Amino acid sequence: MIRYPYVLLDADNTLFDFDTGNRNAFRAVCETQDIPDTDENFALYETCNNAMWAAFDRGECTKDFIVIERFRIFLNKLGLRRDPAVCNQVHLTTLGKSKLLLPHAEEVCRTLSRQCKLYIVTNAVAAVQKSRLAGSGVAPYIEEAFISEDAGASKPSKAYFNYVFGKVPALTTQNCLLVGDSLSSDIQGANNAGLPCCWFNRKGYAHPEGLRIDYEIADLRQLYNIIGVV
């Protein structure tokens, strides 16, 4: 018996290999903007980028702001005079072309879609998300992608999930499962909205305190037993 006939799937680092795509996008920025492409510089960029996205998750700034600001801070720390808006455009364009999927993502989406309705829930930049999804291996199995820019709210806010529920009237807090890798947006969002959730913890991070995690997996194929797909 299907336990969760509706499945809400995060995109980055849940279905798509965002880490590889992100590294390739940074490399493109370095090549086009004459910035040394070193592991140290990438680590510095990631520090700036992660800090800005954490602020976004807390509702402190807009997406349009952070995607430019992350490069402005990064460039300032390196003492380089480059246009952060240009850096961002190169990064997003390159990232939008990356359709790399994580192991078993296509197989799992194909299998689940035979008995479940699958939806993507994401805070990713709309242009990047739509470009990656189109023609990707998982595209045929996804009913719809709910992008925060279109929703007017973002994970982990309850308002974002209210938007999703408004778009799929059959959804209830009992018949759907949210699957994602991010504790701050996916799992916290599920907690805020009262949804069952599954933490995709493929890197084996320590279990956090203060969050309800109904299920935890390291391999997407573990969803079969959780959802009840045979």
Image (cartoon, helix red, strand yellow):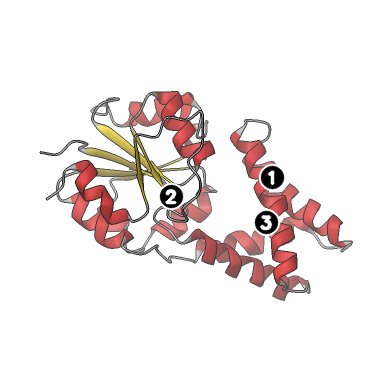
Q: Which residue in the protein does label 1 denote?
A: 51
Identify the secondary structure beneath mark 3: helix
Please tell me the numbered disc located at residue 100.
none
Residue annotated with mark 2: 201
Q: Nearer the viewer, residue 2 or 81?
A: 2
Q: In x, y percent, where is residue 123? A: 51, 42
Picture layout, residue 33 above or below residue 105: below
Type of the residue with mark 1 = Ala
Q: Secondary structure at mark 2?
A: loop
Say which quarter of the image contains residue 57: top right
Q: Which residue is mark 3?
A: 46
Disc nearer the start of the sequence (3/2): 3
Residue 167 in picture, x, y percent from top left: 33, 31
Task: Of the two numbered discs 1 and 3 on the same chain, state the one appearing first in sequence.
Answer: 3
Q: Look at 75% across and 47% down and name the residue there.
A: 69
Q: Could one spot residue 148 in this view of the protein?
A: no
Kind of residue at disc 3: Glu
Q: Position of residue 53 (x, y in %)?
A: 63, 43
**Mark found first going from the N terminus, 2 or 1:** 1
As rendered, which of 46 and 120 lies closer to the eye? 46
Camera-side mark, 3 or 2: 2
Question: Which residue does the image show at 76% across and 56% down from the upper left?
Answer: 84
Q: Amino acid at mark 2?
A: Asn
Counting other residues with Cα less than 10 Å from the Cα at mark 2, is it few (<14), some (14-19), or many (20 or more)? many
Horizontal arrangement in the rendering, residue 170 relative to residue 105 (left or right):
left
Q: Marks 2 and 1, Cα distance to the nearest angstrom?
A: 21 Å
- Look at the numbered discs 1 and 3 and tell me whether their residues touch, using CB distance below 8 Å: no
